[in-house]
Every structure is written in structure tokens, then in C-alpha cells.
Image (cartoon, rainbow, N blue to C red):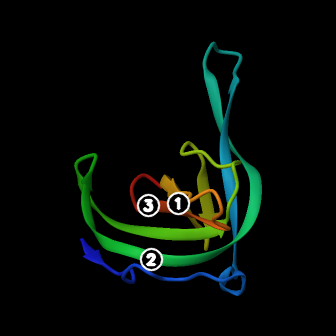
Amino acid sequence: MKSLGQPGGRRVTPGDLTALVVFEAETRTADSYGGATQFWGEAFRAYAAVEPLFVGEREHTGAVRNVVQYRFTIYRTAAIDEQMRIRWDGRTHNIKGFRLGGPQELFMDVITETGLGD
């Protein structure tokens, strides 16, 4: 994979948070056949600074797919978990992890991946 990210030491300011992103959470409800139906609903919206980190190809379910990883920097919140996903720019971004920084940090980074199964 080719790295597109900037070297460490980058500083984000509130004015950099210009992209409106939607965080979605999965809800499963029982159906009348003994199974469950999956539904992704909006959990909350946030403004983010969006930065592509990596671009490349990866094998997934027997096929080679283009993969892009992004960093979404948002105001720090405890409302996010790794089972959520982000909708932005017409695409689904699967959350791979997040970095909170120290307890006094104003922002947090959410690392996502798109291109596999979206």
C-alpha cells in the first residue's frame, strides 16, 4: 500500500472540521421467520477533517479490491465504537479503530477503510 498521510506532528484546528459525516449504528430486529433483519440507522452527525491515509489493493472473498483508508478527525466523544460505520461522500466507511490521545485532547482520530464489502 502507498502511504498518502502526512508525517507526524500535524495540528488540526476547529476550522479544519469542514466535512459533515454521519455515524451509523447497526440494529438487528427479529423477523417473523425466526431470523433477524439488519438495519443501519443514523446515530449522530459530526463535522470532521478528512484525510486519505493509504490507497492500494487487497484480496477479499476471492477478488482483488481497491482499498482506501481515511482518517476522520472529529471533536472527542465517547459515543463511538468500532461496530459503527461512517457515511460520507456517498460511500460507506468501516471503522477500523480510533485514537483518543491524552485526557486533555480536544480531538480524536477515527480510522476507516472503504472498498471491502461496501
The answer to which image quadrant residue 116 occupies is: bottom left
Q: Mark 2 and mark 1: span between their CA atoms?
A: 12 Å
Q: Residue at x 33, y 74 (%)?
A: 55
Q: Residue at x 50, y 69 (%)?
A: 71
Front residue (pair 97, 61): 97
Q: What amino acid does circle 3 point to?
A: Glu
Q: Residue at x 26, y 66 (%)?
A: 57
Seen in the image, is 115 located left or right of residue 23? left
Front residue (pair 46, 42): 46
User: Is there CB contact under 8 Å for labels 3 and 1?
Assistant: yes
Give the mark nearer the N terminus: 2 vs 1.
Answer: 2
Q: What amino acid does circle 2 point to?
A: Pro
Q: Secondary structure at mark 2?
A: strand
Give residue 98's position: percent from left, percent from top: 51, 56
* Residue indicated by mark 1: 93
Q: What amino acid does circle 1 point to?
A: His
Tell me if mark 3 has few (under 14), some (14-19) or many (20+) residues whose alpha carbon lies within 10 angstroms of its own: many
User: Is there CB contact under 8 Å for labels 2 and 1?
Assistant: no
Tell me if mark 1 has few (under 14), some (14-19) or many (20+) residues whose alpha carbon lies within 10 angstroms of its own: many
The answer to which image quadrant residue 100 occupies is: bottom right
Give residue 3's position: percent from left, percent from top: 30, 77
Give residue 54's position: percent from left, percent from top: 34, 73
* Residue indicated by mark 2: 52
Give the mark nearer the N terminus: 3 vs 1.
Answer: 1
* Residue indicated by mark 3: 113
Seen in the image, is 16 located left or right of residue 109? right
